[in-house]
Amino acid sequence: MRTILHPGDAAAERVQVVPTAARRVELALAPGRSLMETLADALTPYGAASAVLDLQGGAFFPFAYVMPATSKTPDHAVYFSERFDAAGPVRLEFATVTYGQRDGQPWLHCHATWIAADGTRRCGHVLPDAAIISQTLRASACLLDGAGFHVHADSETNFSLFKPEPAALRTSQPSATDSLAVRLSPNTDVCTAIEDICRQHGIANATIQGGVGSTVGAVFEDGRTVEPFVTELLVRSGRVREDPHGAPRAEIDVTLVDFTGTMAEGRLRRGANPVLVTFELVLVPV
């Protein structure tokens, strides 16, 4: 399994897990304003300071994004590309979002796939203040209560990253389920880390909600590999199932883009996909 060397010392805690109550709601995000503003307003009536979401359908214009890139300085092991601005409206295909707080204000981390005005299918890191909704989006949100994602400076990677923290329970929601807010650190294998979390918390079956992160290249279950080591990905579908021996096994289907601009899709192979910078998700037992 490949690894990445970041400029800072690696923290002893490689997996962060915080129990949370999770409640699913369906939202329609109307056109006219940025993804950041619209999503913050849509979640305010629920009192939700943190959530993970899937977005589908609709369109954006104007629309700006960045891509994964190698770093030009020793301050970071990897970095972002320059900003790209779409020449015309883009049709959203699918996106995953981590929504939380940065300096006491709403913020989000979004990776998406979309169809550009010229028909090209693309994937990248959406700039939430510079993506204006032009056609209504459908959002499936998993609202968190008792935990939240907050942006903190990370000394290992030298980035500011979402990390889960305990939070006061707002209310006792009748439809809420006991879940886990998770962040995985660099060089932690995605699948086996999630399986270990489930094993430690007595979870045999679960769904993965949200899922925004990056890996050191990629190895898929069918043997295909992504050699360029800087990627950003989103989880299209993820779950943990109990195998015939009673052990949890993660099945995680992703879409990613690497620093050459090449997209790839597939199911991550267990034990072969270390985190590059970070990986955020929520585990909901079923």
Image (tube, rainbow, N blue to C red):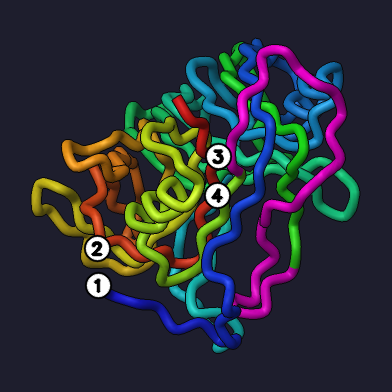
Query: Viewed as shown, does residue 4 lie left or right of 34?
Result: left
Element assignment for label 1: loop
Of all residues, the one furthest to the right in this rendering is 104
- In the image shown, does 1 or 35 lie closer to the viewer? 1
- Residue contact between numbered discs 4 and 3, judged by CB atoms under 8 Å: no
Percent position (x, y) of residue 168? 86, 40
**Amino acid type, mark 1:** Met
Instruction: Name the residue: 81% across, 41% down.
Output: 106
Q: Which residue is mark 1?
A: 1
Cα separation, mark 4 vs mark 3, equals 7 Å
**Amino acid type, mark 4:** Glu
Q: Which residue is mark 4?
A: 280
Quadrant of the image containing the C terminus: top left
- In the image shown, does 172 or 283 lie closer to the viewer? 172
Instruction: Name the residue: 35% across, 66% down.
Output: 216
Percent position (x, y) of residue 231? 38, 59
Instruction: Name the residue: 40% across, 55% down.
Output: 196
Q: Earlier in the sequence, mark 4 or mark 1?
A: 1
Q: Earlier in the sequence, mark 3 or mark 1?
A: 1
Percent position (x, y) of residue 164? 68, 52
- Residue contact between numbered discs 2 and 4, judged by CB atoms under 8 Å: no
Q: Which residue is mark 3?
A: 282
**Amino acid type, mark 3:** Val
Q: Which residue is mark 2?
A: 272
Query: Viewed as shown, does residue 43 lie left or right of 74?
Result: right
Q: Earlier in the sequence, mark 2 or mark 3?
A: 2
Crowd rating for badge 1 (residues with CA inside 10 Å; few <14, some 14–19, many 20+) = few
Quadrant of the image containing the N terminus: bottom left
The magenta-colored residue range is 153-180
- Residue contact between numbered discs 2 and 1, judged by CB atoms under 8 Å: yes
